Image (cartoon, coloured by chain):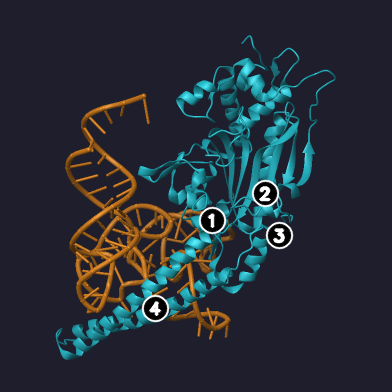
Chain colours: A cyan, B orange
Amino acid sequence: MLDQRLLRDNPELITSQLARRGLHLDLSPLQAIALQERDLEARRSELQAEGNRIGKQVGALIKAGAAAAGPEVQALRDQGNAIKQQVAELEEQEKALETQLREQLLALPNLPSADAPDGRDERDNIEVKRWGEPRQAAAGEILEEHWQIGERLGLWETERSVRIAQSRFITLQGQGARLERALISFMLDLHGSRGYCELLPPILVNSASLTGSGQLPKFAEESFRCAEDDLWLTPTAEVPVTSLHREEVIAAEQLPLRYVAYTPCFRREAGSYGRDTRGLIRLHQFNKVELYWFCHPEHSAAAHEQITGDAEAVLEALELPYRRIELCSGDLGFSASRTYDLEVWLAGAGAYREISSCSVCGDFQARRSAIRCKQGKTTQLVHTLNGSGLAVGRTMAALLENGQQADGSVRLPAALAPYFGSDRLSAAA
RNA sequence: GGAGAGGUGGCCGAGUGGUCGAAGGCGCAGCACUGGAAAUGCUGUAUAGGGGCAACUCUAUCGAGGGUUCGAAUCCCUCCCUCUCCGCCA
């Protein structure tokens, strides 16, 4: 959520920054609401102060021996009642404006960071780094896509999973299930050794949590919902982890708080019919190990580099070639002010695919979630960052495509062998 | 699902109609004491919004929302949540 003061004092700044996202809005009506709301509040609180004075006078008079039903006291009572009525009227107007203001502010995305490059959509994103040697097919070699390998090796069940749930759900089995589990453990251990505190949070989350991290109110149609309970299936661990500290004041010395959380994630993937229908790339349910920081506002830029580096460390340990893309202003997610996407090389598909997204949200989520830090007498909103470290299914896809061998088996990176119990997936197993 | 208890500041915990934003304690900060520290003592220490250059000041907030009253943490109603016991269950 954006700062109401900024809206009142400098709406042009908001307008010009949102324009960088491709949003062209006239904020003057909203600014007018904000200004009007403040005026009402000022008038109301003056009246309340007057009412408080009258109340005290009555108390003093009665204490001094005046008759509770006497004319003097009665006159004050009448005054008090008159004020009460006026306050009630103002309050009603004020509340209506407040509701409008909040609703509209909650629907506005974060402002892009000054460091985020300008651009309209993903075509304007900038590649900032490449790591590893992308595997290309040798002469006469045909590289399979991961879904082909998976089906051939029996790593998962697709058709039967539709029986259990519906399309875009998958059942991993045998080596596939074991590899998924190995990857989760491997990632958690790696991040744990780099100082992250491991969390296993609820994956049913309430509306306040989704609002706090920015998924509500705008993206309700993207999440699965248990309507009778005001609970939703979390689309990312970012949601429960943000709310872990919702409405808290954290001592500045404790920052940064760095968490790593494994959760299944649930997304409707509305509007993506026909895309990535095979394999592990786009499912309604997938596993993800998420990194999350709460940090002091002054340190968030440096933290962004670090969290991205932590995600990259997983790719490097798994010997997976990747590139780092900086998202342009027009391609940023709702809550993000600056984002690096990591794209892993898929040798079979012959393309880089997103496997991690590392974002700074500034105080956007912290304001929605009321998470502050305190240093001496100063209390201010913290900054939050999140990054996938990594999306597990897509990691498996990359391992399959990049590790495939001429004999049909798949070679796994050495770092994973202790977790998986072997350095190879094979048809025989 | 049945029965009961309770939601007060960063934390614990008093407070049943009138300067109560709230005793006391813990924690934290400053000062004093000390060679230094511990212990001790004193002082300060909630959040949000408005006004003021500032000192400061006004308003709101004791789970949430209504109500009674000149005045509510305190009385009434509704809702939410937490805890304990029993049942059920991995």
Label 2 to label 1: alpha-carbon separation: 17 Å
Mark 4 neighbour class, 10 Å CA radius: few under 14, some 14 to 19, many 20 or more = many
Discs 3 and 2 share one subunit: yes
Name the residue carrying label 1: A366
The type of residue carrying mark 4 is Arg
The type of residue carrying mark 2 is Thr
Image quarter where the C terminus of chain A lies is: top right
- Tell me residue A27's x, y (percent): 58, 68
Q: Residue at x 48, y 76 (%)?
A: A36
Can residue A249 be seen here? The reply is no
Q: How many numbered marks does the figure carry?
A: 4
Please name whichever residue, A355 or A311, is drawn nearer the observer in this view of the structure.
Answer: A355
Sequence-wise first label, 2 or 1: 2
Name the residue carrying label 4: A44
Element at label 4: helix
Discs 4 and 3 share one subunit: yes
Position of B78 with respect to A127 (left or right) is: left
Query: Is residue A277 depicted above or below A358 in this figure?
Result: above
Mark linked to residue A410: none
